[in-house]
Amino acid sequence: MNANDLWFTTRGAGLSALLSLSVATACGALGSLATMLPGTRVVVQYLHRTAAALGIGLIVVHVSSIVLDSKSHIGLAGALVPFAAHYRPNAVALGSVTAYLLLTVAALGLARGRLAAAPAGARLSRLAHSLGYLLWATAVLHALLAGTDRGQGWVVLLVIGCVLLVLAAGSVRLFALEERAAGAMPAVRSSGGATGPIDNVSSPIATRQIDSATRQIDSATRPIGSATRPIGGATRPIGSANRPPTGQPRNVLR
């Protein structure tokens, strides 16, 4: 195998890894949709894990071939240590850091079942999976900045296709989350009879407004007999306002 074969292997494995990671990211975004059928969810999650494992394997091939290529001016230290490469050190360092973090996310994903047993572990697992979107974006930047064939038409189309795939899946996920949040809001009936969600019911201003409206409704529906008005500086029930004091005779008209 000559230097050209190693370089083609490096670029082919790198772009194939980008495609696999794009599929894994898109399937990960769609795999947790509540509206998805159980059978479809199983298939999507299987594709997510398979594509992620394939992408990591292609990254290993990508790094190994570029280390073996003496004309790449990268070497073992340049591939493993960020900013140590002689060839485009910033772009190669971006790929190295992305690979390390991807391996960390994959390891946490394998231990997801054990981590979910504790609340802190479950939060860590969700955070790690959310980090996958950022790592996918850095992988795209690495492919565009480090490759010598980034100006080739088929490479540009491949990168655009990967970006559109992940953006479409992310948009579907965000729309589903908004629909779920809107459906979870309680509805109240307004004076016109229409119903609508309560906005910011947990804020202090909204809580005071609801309490004030409740007091107004209570005072409006209170029985008249229990209302009071001032008489001589004191309060006396309205129903007993014309009643004479105790012990005095009543004026009876005959």
Image (tube, rainbow, N blue to C red):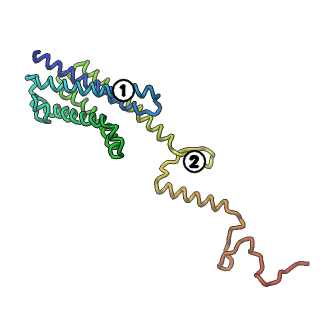
Q: Amino acid at mark 1?
A: Tyr
Q: Are marks 2 and 1 in contact (CB under 8 Å)?
A: no
Q: Which mark is residue 46?
A: 1
Separation (CA) of disc 2 from disc 1: 42 Å
Of 68 and 227, which appears nearest the observer?
68
Of 233 and 13, which appears nearest the observer?
13
x%, y% of residue 135? 27, 34
- Give the image quarter of residue 248: bottom right
- Give the image quarter of residue 124: top left
Mark positioned earlier in the residue sequence (2 or 1) = 1
Image point (83%, 80%), residue name: 250
Considering the numbered disc 1 on the image, is that residue within a helix, a strand or a loop? Answer: helix
Disc 1 crowd, CA 10 A, few/some/many (<14, 14-19, 20+): some
100 relative to 172 in the view: left or right:
left
x%, y% of residue 211? 55, 58
- Residue matched to label 2: 188
- Give the image quarter of residue 218: bottom right
In the picture shown, does residue 219 fall above or below 238?
above
Disc 2 crowd, CA 10 A, few/some/many (<14, 14-19, 20+): few
Image label count: 2
Considering the numbered disc 2 on the image, is that residue within a helix, a strand or a loop? Answer: strand
x%, y% of residue 117? 36, 43
Q: Which mark is residue 226?
A: none
Image point (58%, 57%), residue name: 213
176 relative to 106 in the view: left or right:
right
Q: Amino acid at mark 2?
A: Val
| The C terminus lies in quadrant | bottom right
